[in-house]
Amino acid sequence: MADPSSYRPKPGEIPDSPGVYKFRDEHRRVIYVGKAKNLRQRVANYFQDLANLHPRTRTMVTTAASVEWTVVSTEVEALQLEYSWIKEFDPRFNVKYRDDKSYPYLAVTLNEEFPRVQVMRGAKKKGVRYFGPYGHAWAIRETVDLMLRVFPVRTCSAGVFKNAERTGRPCLLGYIGKCSAPCVGRVTPEEHRELAEDFCAFMAGRTGTYIRRLEKDMAQAAEEMEYERAARLRDDAGALKRAMEKSAVVLADATDADLIAVAEDELEAALQIFHVRGGRVRGQRGWVTDKVEAVDTSGLVEHALQQLYGEERGDAVPKEVLVPALPEDPDAVAQWLTDRRGSQVSLRIPQRGDKKDLMATVQRNAQQALGLHKTKRASDLTTRSRALEEIAEALGLDAAPLRVECYDISHLQGDDVVASMVVFEDGLARKSEYRRFQIKGFEGQDDVRSMHEVIGRRFKRYLQEKERTGEGDEQHASDAPATEAAPSAAGPAPGSPETAEGPSAAGPAPGSPETAEGPSAVGPVPGVPGAAGGPGALEAPTAPTAPEGPAATGPVPAPPLAPASPDDATGPREEDGRPKRFAYPPQLVVVDGGQPQVAAAQRALDELGIHDIAVCGLAKRLEEVWLPDDDDPVVLPRSSEGLYLLQRIRDEAHRFAITYQRAKRAKRIRSSPLDDVSGLGETRKQALIKHFGSVKKLRQATIDQICEVPGIGRRTAESVAAALAATAPAAPAVNTATGEIIEEDDGDSS
């Protein structure tokens, strides 16, 4: 590993002009290429304290052994030279978008005497008109098959064409009217070229002219009573319309534009491009790339533009390029695109209307492409096995963790604090085992304390399940200290059902799991009566005491649990048919967070006497893996399959938690005092609000005035008045930032 100070240029050596620089390693291979408006400022940034550099940049400068630069006169020249060097040297630390497949194009070979329509891949050839790219070759063939009725252009290969010329007989398409058969002289070369040019014009978006012409000819044939010809023209017009439907209109103003969207995480980025010509989506393609350099969204967009249009000229560069973020120097990039097109190119971010809506669609495609890429990596059995082995090796586990549970905390500024638990078995998600929790042990924002509560509640339930079945009692007794072994025979051990949360009349008990991918609650889940410390108690008593009554002779079994969701029907079941919830312990617990969250999770397990479950945390910023009692994180290689799997598990826990938190917050925001009135449905609630205008005015109304609302009787009116009186605010709320009194919401209560 080289010391950057050993090859740092001397002060004043680097010019302050625009230019392009490249780093070389000890073997003189170019490993990174970049450009700058001011070379002196940009290059100097690489030689600051290594601790201040991004990890990828730090790796690059310690791999390099020298730096060189070339001065240019303008920023546009710098952009062009950077692209040329990246293409020439293929530096390992530059982001490169590579197709995971060769996208097919619809091509018309206008450079031949008799132009041919065909599917083409690979490098573009001079004199050939291209349309696309398309996602699948069969999509091109379907479009061509429809259009050959109207534009019977040659589609056969050179060998078939020459054989037809020699024999004087056309191919099958010539007999059925889908080829004008220039091979046997049915049309002249000039007439066939005109057909090919009309085909290209239709594909370029000038569709109205041809359809109107066909409809006019159809009407004329019908007037002349040539009904067979009229029917054929009708079918031709229908074929063109069906071909047009395959590329729906997305922009009403017949815009020619490329829309580029980027979806990214810490390690990878997915790029999606929609090619819109004449207001219709004519092609789509995308790539997934490793983020081998420290780059943000604007940098990814700039790299994409270079690689998309670096070899293009003329109409291949559209009039408008819509992006999610502008490059660092948008004017220079726009000028570079303008030079390549030969006319003005607009580079901008869509702000409103159809273009913004279409950009959102492209962004969703990019997100799905990134998710699919990660899923494919995770679904491969060999990859998953290697990932689990890498995790076991990195964390020092005796065996691969076949069951992994991950926990995440979600809240909005301390309100509606919830947690999620996701389960991966053999590297794949087990959604029927997902659980979600409400944090009820305290109020406010404290991720560390919340993590401690959730881990404690989950594994208390695990111990309850073990005691119900009598599994593992001897094992845990032997693992416990000698001073605690004796009391456990006469009373509950720490973490036993006696320390679990009790039932809640209003909903699920604080220790109960919420349903996975379903309603947040299906009724109260029975807890264990006599919970030490009442609802919300988390820690086991330090000195177990003998309970009163029948429980004195041994542990009290927890009551059976009701199924929480339809997903549980496929999971493991008790002898009575009810699904097990927390019967199986994981080999590894992953928490979303760094050292504090890991310490809290480990402390919760230690308090319950559980010592055979490994714990780690995955910190978002640098994707570092933290272990309990370790001051330094475990850094897995960027290309590690184990890191990919941990990241996917963490992201799934985050998704599950934030989905629940948003639903819970939305339900709270939509709540109304009228929700608690027995027998008052949505229709009558709406009638009350519509009649009085707001809950505030409804609260001020008398019972007789409430009875004036159609459908509201006196008993219901009394219930409404009582409910509103019970929830009347004690004092007006005040906005602490502005000092304004916040009036009660006058909107709809539903």
Image (cartoon, rainbow, N blue to C red):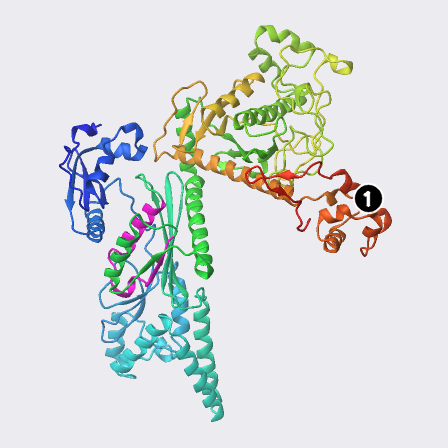
Task: Name the image quarter holding the N terminus.
Answer: top left
Where on the picture, by quarter, is residue 253? bottom left
Residue 606 screen position, x and y as percent: 54, 17
Q: Which residue position holds label 1? A: 719
Local SS, label 1: helix
**Residue 55, above or below 285:** above
* Left-right relation of 626 to 107: right
Q: Picture coordinates of residue 255 (x, y %)?
A: 38, 66
- For the image, the number of numbered tags is 1
Q: Is residue 609 above or below residue 402?
A: above
Residue 69, horizontal then vertical, whole percent: 16, 42
Left or right of residue 743: residue 317: left
| Residue 382 in sight here | yes
Visible residue check, residue 518:
no
Q: Is residue 310 magenta?
A: yes
Please identify the residue farthest to the right as the structure is shown: 714
Give me the residue at 66% from left, 22% from top.
Answer: 500
Estimate the x, y position of residue 533 in percent, counting from the top left.
68, 19
Q: Nearer the viewer, residue 376 or 352?
A: 352
Bin the neighbour count of mark 1 within 10 Å (Cα to Cα): few under 14, some 14-19, many 20 and up. Answer: some
Q: Quadrant of residue 570?
A: top right
Q: Residue furthest front?
A: 739
Q: Residue at x 82, y 55 (%)?
A: 708
Residue type, label 1: Ser
Q: Nearer the viewer, residue 527 or 424?
A: 527
Magenta-drawn stretch contains 718 = no
Taking 361 as reference, is 197 left or right? left
Q: Which residues are magenta?
A: 297-323
